[in-house]
Amino acid sequence: MTVKHVFVSTERLSPAQKHAINKLQAECFRRVTRKETRECFFAKSFGRVLAYESDLIVGQAELFSRQVYFLGKKVLLGGVGGTCVTGSARHRGIGTLLVSSGLSILRVRRCDIACLNANVRKYPRGGMYYRLGFRLMGRRVSFEDVHGVMRYDFGELFLPICSKAIYDSVMTSEKTFHIGRGYW
Ligand SMILES: CC(C)(COP(=O)(O)OP(=O)(O)OC[C@H]1O[C@@H](n2cnc3c(N)ncnc32)[C@H](O)[C@@H]1OP(=O)(O)O)[C@@H](O)C(=O)NCCC(=O)NCCS
């Protein structure tokens, strides 16, 4: 069956789309606790790429962009989060399609680099993300949680989008990269 994908900005999501996405995320992210989502993964996406098979949503990816500073320079940081595909539709390239289409949108928005959080315990090099060009950062990143507490995390993957120079400086510096308030 053919899979179609569409970008929908956050404010244009219909109630039916929101309902289908909640169901899909409940199925796909059982390992992430509600507490963790509330405290850490609360960044607001500007839109989503939705994958449709007939009129059913079978996958989605959320897109983020925010300005941060690194080594005193402005960086437009893009992100892809919450990528998921319903169990029965996996291993057919839909996840790859969602992320690559999300990256095209981040390019149009002129993001310098993109980053995401992946299950590196199961996929040490990044699995699907590695094949799309993402590379593992060798050091931890920081972000601020909902309580304003600084948290640190290993296993982030980065990809150059509009600026290879910024990507190189972020990846090779010894300074902790700060993602900002809330993660995806
Ligand atoms: C990750 C996920 C979106 C992939 O969807 P998909 O449509 O099967 O993706 P594709 O067919 O394009 O690629 C499949 C490949 O991605 C890789 N992959 C699977 N899960 C992955 C993950 N969590 N992270 C990175 N790569 C992954 C595998 O190498 C897989 O190869 P295989 O088909 O030979 O097993 C899907 O498995 C899913 O929804 N998982 C549960 C939610 C989740 O963990 N999301 C990722 C958050 S970072």
Image (cartoon, grey):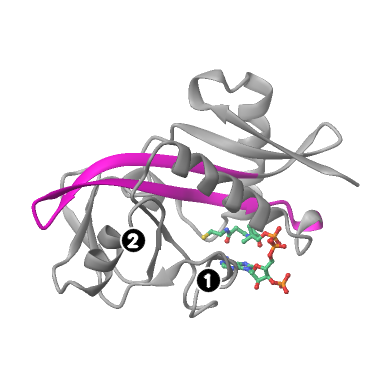
Label 1 beta carbon within 8 A of ligand 1: yes
Mark pair 2, 1: CA separation: 17 Å
Give residue 30's position: percent from left, percent from top.
57, 56
Most common secondary structure along the magenta stretch: strand
Work out whether 44 lies above or below 35: above
Task: Report the number of discs.
Answer: 2
Q: Is residue 7 above or below residue 119?
A: above
Reading the image, the residue beneath label 2 is: 164
Answer with mark 2 or mark 1, whichever residue precedes in sequence: 1
Left or right of 38, for residue 123: right
2 is higher (above) or lower (below) than 28: above
Judge the density around disc 2: few (<14), some (14-19), many (≥20) Cα neighbours within 10 Å: few
Q: Amino acid at mark 1?
A: Tyr
The x, y position of residue 102, in whole percent, is 55, 45
Queried whether the magenta region covers residue 109, the answer comes back as: no
Span colored in magenta = 60-88
The amino acid type of the residue labelled 2 equals Lys
Residue 39 numbered mark, or none: none
**Residue 36 image offset from top left, x and y in percent:** 38, 52
Kindly state the secondary structure of the residue where label 2 is placed.
Answer: helix
Residue depicted at x 44% and y 31%: 46
For the residue pair 98 and 180, the one nearer the viewer reads as 98
Q: Is residue 15 left or right of residue 140?
A: right
Question: On the rendering, which quadrant does ligand 1 occupy?
Answer: bottom right
Q: Say which residue label 1 marks.
A: 130
Q: At x 54% / y 77%, what residue is drawn?
A: 123
Count residues near mark 1 (Cα–Cα under 10 Å), then give few for <14, some for 14-19, many for 20+. Answer: some
The mark closer to the camera, 2 or 1, is: 2
